[in-house]
Image (tube, rainbow, N blue to C red):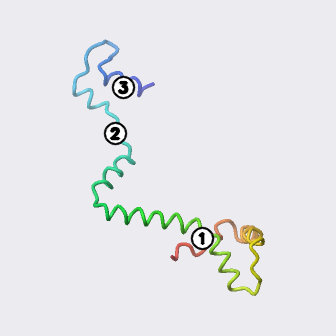
């Protein structure tokens, strides 16, 4: 309600129907969202630098998604158990029960 009231004052619709002065209009402007500021600043960077940032973020997301599977793969590599794809969910559940859900990402920060 307060925002709508401020928007009305910005448009010159005061409760008294008097035009808003530039000084009052400036005081009621909403600040730009942080995401818009970041986007504007990123667009000022050269395209090559933006591509490096995009690649880094994509790599972090991919590594985070793949880490649980990688952890299970490493556990199979160091054990004498025969790998069976159908056992992967039960191995994951065993890790979660014994060590907690964050154990699936153990060692993820090292790389």
Tell which of 24 and 57 is nearer to you: 57
Q: Secondary structure at mark 1?
A: helix
Residue 59: % across, % down: 48, 67
Q: Secondary structure at mark 2?
A: loop
Whether 17 is drawn above or below 24: the answer is above
As drawn, is 65 to the left or to the right of 39? right
First-in-chain label (3 vs 2): 3
Q: Quadrant of the N terminus?
A: top left
Q: Quadrant of residue 6?
A: top left
Tell which of 53 and 96 is nearer to you: 53
Residue 98: % across, % down: 74, 71
Image label count: 3
As drawn, is 46 to the left or to the right of 107? left
Q: Quadrant of residue 76?
A: bottom right
The residue where tag 3 is placed is: 6
As drawn, is 72 to the left or to the right of 57? right
Residue contact at pointers 2 and 1, CB within 8 angstroms: no
Q: Secondary structure at mark 3?
A: helix
The residue where tag 1 is placed is: 67
- For residue 31, the mark is 2
Mark 1 crowdedness (10 Å alpha carbons): few <14, some 14-19, many ≥20: some
Residue 48: % across, % down: 32, 65
Disc 1 versus disc 3: distance between alpha carbons?
49 Å
Whether 10 is drawn above or below 58: the answer is above
User: Looking at the image, is mark 1 or mark 3 nearer the viewer?
Assistant: 1
């Amino acid at each position: 309600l307060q925002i709508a009231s401020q928007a009305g004052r910005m448009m010159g619709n005061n409760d008294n129907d008097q035009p808003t002065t530039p000084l009052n209009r400036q005081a009621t402007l909403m600040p730009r969202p942080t995401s818009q500021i970041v986007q504007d600043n990123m667009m000022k960077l050269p395209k090559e630098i933006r591509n490096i940032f995009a690649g880094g973020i994509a790599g972090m997301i991919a590594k985070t998604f793949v880490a649980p599977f990688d952890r299970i793969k490493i556990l199979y590599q160091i054990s004498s158990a025969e790998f069976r794809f159908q056992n992967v969910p039960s191995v994951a559940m065993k890790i979660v029960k014994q060590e907690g859900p964050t154990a699936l990402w153990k060692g993820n920060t090292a790389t």
